Image: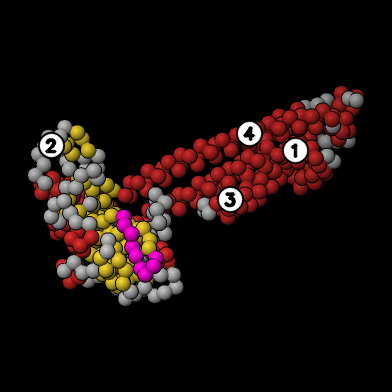
Amino acid sequence: MLNPLDGGKIAIGALRVNVLRSLLTMLGIMIGVGAVIVMVAIGAGARDMIGVQIRSIGSNLILVIPGATVTGGARLGSGSVHTLKSTDAEAIAKECPAVKLTAPIWGDVNQVVYGNRNWRTRITGTTEDNFLIREWPIRRGRMFTPEEQKRAAKVAVLGLTVVENLFGDTDPLGKMIRMKSVPFTVVGVLDRKGQSPRGDDQDDAVFVPLKTSQYRLFGTPFPDEIQAIMVQAKDVSLIPDAQKQIDELLTRRHKIGRHQEKDFTVRNLTEILETAQKSLNIMTTLLGAIAAISLLVGGIGIMNIMLVSVTERTREIGIRMAVGARSGDILSQFLIEGVVLSITGGLIGTALGILAAFAFARTSGWPALIDPGTVLIAILFSAAVGVFFGFYPAFKASRLHPIEALRHE
């Protein structure tokens, strides 16, 4: 039986006779393997990026917003009416065992002015628990205090984007800014947070005490009204329990009957992450499957070229058989040639795929994660393609009769 090492040397020697044809034969495998690696790397990077962005909002997070209701015969969507109060947030924190923290929110977009500079940004009234829920530490200065909350103090905490646009290199702590002609003292600067899953700049924000926003800046149509409640469950496994407890509590507090439309909506942001990742998994699988078709096309190309090679080398096969080569030796030789072609194409395609993935990540800012397991599977699959599509030409070569092969011109 032909030694695999000797068979490999013979196969490489045969392929080197016509290098251009060998490269063209490997092209389909190279494109297929490279495309699979690029698609999987970009898909994995996208999943990771979305996960980071979701986690940047906060962990175990639930959002309560004014929900669908019936007003004058028309059903309004979530967030279209204001039916929540800060007392709802306090009640959720006290009466829902699965809830750790709550933070009411009331705000709007407006101009912030410092000296001769101004910047339009989101101004949010909230409590200090908001930053614990969102895991957003103070970089410099301090957070507003419970006492400042009670007396609606005119103090503000700034995101880094606002600091950069209003103050540049100047230290903002202790400086006076104006919002809606009301003077505020900057008491703190938040650490950098980055983009939200929707692509918004989370650092482009100003935070003030909730009562300050309600009574000194934007006012409220009804006393103590708020736009939303951020809730943090005690553990990710308790999120469903927390949702149920919040739903039951607000249903009682808002005196909603069994057949009445609820005036609030409870959203689990973990579900948003899972939905986004499932969509990306489906898309990555689809793109990977499309790329895998190139591997099959490449395999067909290998089979065609191997059949041509068998025809061209029929006389050589006859000579080998005449000097003692057995059918198994001929089968092994041509099968090894097919595997060498496919593995070489797979290795080249892997290198090109990794380079393309990193080039895409560098130019687009989109992360690309190379999974060693995916690389190994792609190379093994390319070898399997060589075996599968190389077997028939190899088998055909091994079944040639020595006398007929020697007579072949």
Nearer the N terminus, badge 4 or badge 2? Answer: 2
Locate residue 137: give its quadrant: bottom left
Q: Which residue is mark 4?
A: 296
**Labelled disc at residue 131:** none
Q: Are marks 3 and 2 in contact (CB under 8 Å)?
A: no
329 relative position to 216: left or right:
right
Q: How far apart are the alpha carbons under marks 2 and 1?
A: 70 Å
Label 4 amino acid? Leu
- Percent across and percent down for residue 316 are 87, 33
Q: Which residue is mark 2?
A: 260
**Labelled disc at residue 24:** 1
Frontmost of labels 4 and 2 is: 2
Nearer the N terminus, badge 4 or badge 3? Answer: 4
Crowding at dot 2, Cα within 10 Å, few <14 / some 14-19 / many 20+, comes out as few
Q: Are marks 4 and 2 in contact (CB under 8 Å)?
A: no
Q: How far apart are the alpha carbons under marks 3 and 1?
A: 25 Å
Q: Which residue is mark 3?
A: 360
Nearer the N terminus, badge 2 or badge 1? Answer: 1
Nearer the N terminus, badge 4 or badge 1? Answer: 1
Frontmost of labels 4 and 1 is: 1
Secondary-structure class at tag 2 = loop
Location of residue 370 with respect to 170 vertically, above or below: above
Q: How far apart are the alpha carbons under marks 3 and 2?
A: 52 Å
Label 3 amino acid? Phe
140 relative position to 99: left or right:
right
Report the span colored magenta: 109-117
